[in-house]
Image (cartoon, rainbow, N blue to C red):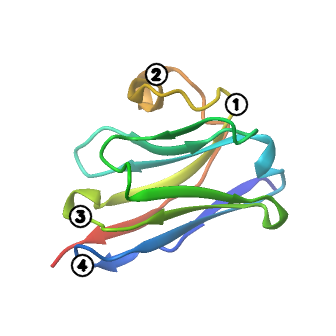
């Protein structure tokens, strides 16, 4: 069964850190470009990070540059999103997706109406930054 499952979300205070995990089953995650997306209530979907399958291309949204880092552990068939110095505006549901169109550096490619397919995606994990 092909599946992506995120974990690691939670309720934290501003300035705290979280590490989100994206576990794949039924396919090799390393064969895909893997992006992390987030969506807050009433807002458009936003791509926050991406690693290409070759790891030769990376993308980070301007809002998270310097604070978020995506890594891959091919042996465990997992990707991770380390989120440091979290801010209230980072509050959203975060999900990972396997895609096959690289990691473009333009935010518009990651928007829901871009027409670019998310081959596989997880259900998401809630991140709430408050306090």
Label 1 close to label 2 by CB (< 8 Å): no
Q: Splitting the image into 4 quarters, where does residue 112 fall?
A: top left
| Local secondary structure at mark 4 | loop
Q: Position of residue 12 (x, y in %)?
A: 30, 79
Please rate how many residues cluster around mark 2, counting C-alpha atoms within 10 Å: few if below 14, some from 14 to 19, many from 20. few
Against 96, residue 125 (above or below) is: below
* Mark before the other along the chain sequence, 1 or 2: 1
- Residue at mark 4 to residue at mark 3: CA–CA distance: 8 Å
What SS does tag 3 mark? loop
Q: Could you tell me which residue is drawn at 60 percent across and 28 percent down?
A: 117
Mark 2 or 3, nearer chain start? 3
Residue at 40% x, 29% y: name it: 107
| Residue 52: percent from left, percent from top | 67, 38
- Name the residue that disc number 1 marks: 100
Q: Does residue 83 appear left or right of residue 35 in this picture?
A: left
Residue that carries the numbered disc 2 in the rendered image: 114
Q: Is residue 74 left or right of residue 116?
A: right
Q: Is residue 91 left or right of residue 84?
A: left
Q: CA distance from mark 2 to mark 4?
A: 33 Å
4 or 3: tag closer to the N-terminus: 4
> Seen from this angle, which residue lies furthest left?
131
| Residue, disc 3 | 87
Question: Mark 3 or mark 1: which comes first in sequence?
Answer: 3
Comparing labels 2 and 3, the label whose residue is closer to the camera: 3
Residue that numbered label 4 is attached to: 13
């Amino acid at each position: 069964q092909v599946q992506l499952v995120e974990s690691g979300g939670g309720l934290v205070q501003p300035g705290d850190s979280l590490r989100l995990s994206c576990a794949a089953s039924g396919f090799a995650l390393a064969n895909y470009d893997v992006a992390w997306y987030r969506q807050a209530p009433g807002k458009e979907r936003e791509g926050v990070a991406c690693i290409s399958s070759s790891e030769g291309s990376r993308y980070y949204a301007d809002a998270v540059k310097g604070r978020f880092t995506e890594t891959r552990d091919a042996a465990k068939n997992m990707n991770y999103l380390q989120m440091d110095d979290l801010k209230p505006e980072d509050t959203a549901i975060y999900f990972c997706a396997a895609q096959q169109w690289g990691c473009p550096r333009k935010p518009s490619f990651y928007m829901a109406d871009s027409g670019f397919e998310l081959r596989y995606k997880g259900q998401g994990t809630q991140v709430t930054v408050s306090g």
